[in-house]
Amino acid sequence: MDFFVPSSSNSAQAESVFSSIAQHIAAPSQEKRIHKLQWKHEGEICACEVGESLPEVFRTDEKVLAIFDCGNVFKVCTPSRGAIKFDPIHASKSTLLNVEYFD
């Protein structure tokens, strides 16, 4: 699947939004863009995908805008978790089950 950011009208806008979110959460440069992530959170298997709603455990139906590899942790960003305000959702690499990248 080709890289995108939900609600972006074209690839240039998607890159701009992605870069803005990365700067906001202090994410390092991303060699590869993450499309899907699966990890264990509080004993449950969680999966998220760019453009889809967060897992139920997070008690919101916000769509995932971007996922960043930030060293020992992945940061999952939605409009109110990381993109505009508050902190992103953290998924520890020690609990990682699967990661898939955009083409």
Image (cartoon, rainbow, N blue to C red):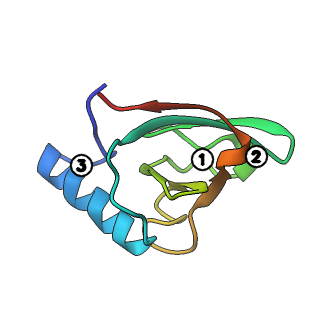
User: Could you tell me the amino acid type at mark 1?
Assistant: Asp
Q: Nearer the viewer, residue 69 or 50?
A: 69
- Residue 40 in view (yes/no): yes
Residue receiving disc 2: 57
User: Could you tell me the amino acid type at mark 2?
Assistant: Val
**CB of mark 1 within 8 Å of CB of mark 3?**
no
Left or right: residue 39 versus residue 5 is: right
Q: CA distance from mark 1 to mark 3?
A: 19 Å
In x, y percent, where is residue 41? 77, 46
Image quadrant where residue 86 sits: bottom right
Q: Earlier in the sequence, mark 3 or mark 2?
A: 3
In x, y percent, where is residue 82? 50, 66
In x, y percent, where is residue 87? 58, 70
Task: Tell me which residue sits at (34%, 45%) in the image.
Answer: 6
Residue 91: assigned label: none
Q: Count the marks.
A: 3
User: Could you tell me the amino acid type at mark 3?
Assistant: Ser
- Residue 10 in view (yes/no): no
Image quadrant where residue 22 sits: bottom left
Task: Tell me which residue sits at (62%, 58%) in the image.
Answer: 89
- Give the position of the C terminus as an image quadrant: top left
Query: SS at mark 3?
Result: loop
Q: Nearer the viewer, residue 71 or 86?
A: 71
Residue 61: assigned label: 1
Q: Earlier in the sequence, mark 1 or mark 3?
A: 3
Residue receiving disc 3: 8
In x, y percent, where is residue 60? 65, 52
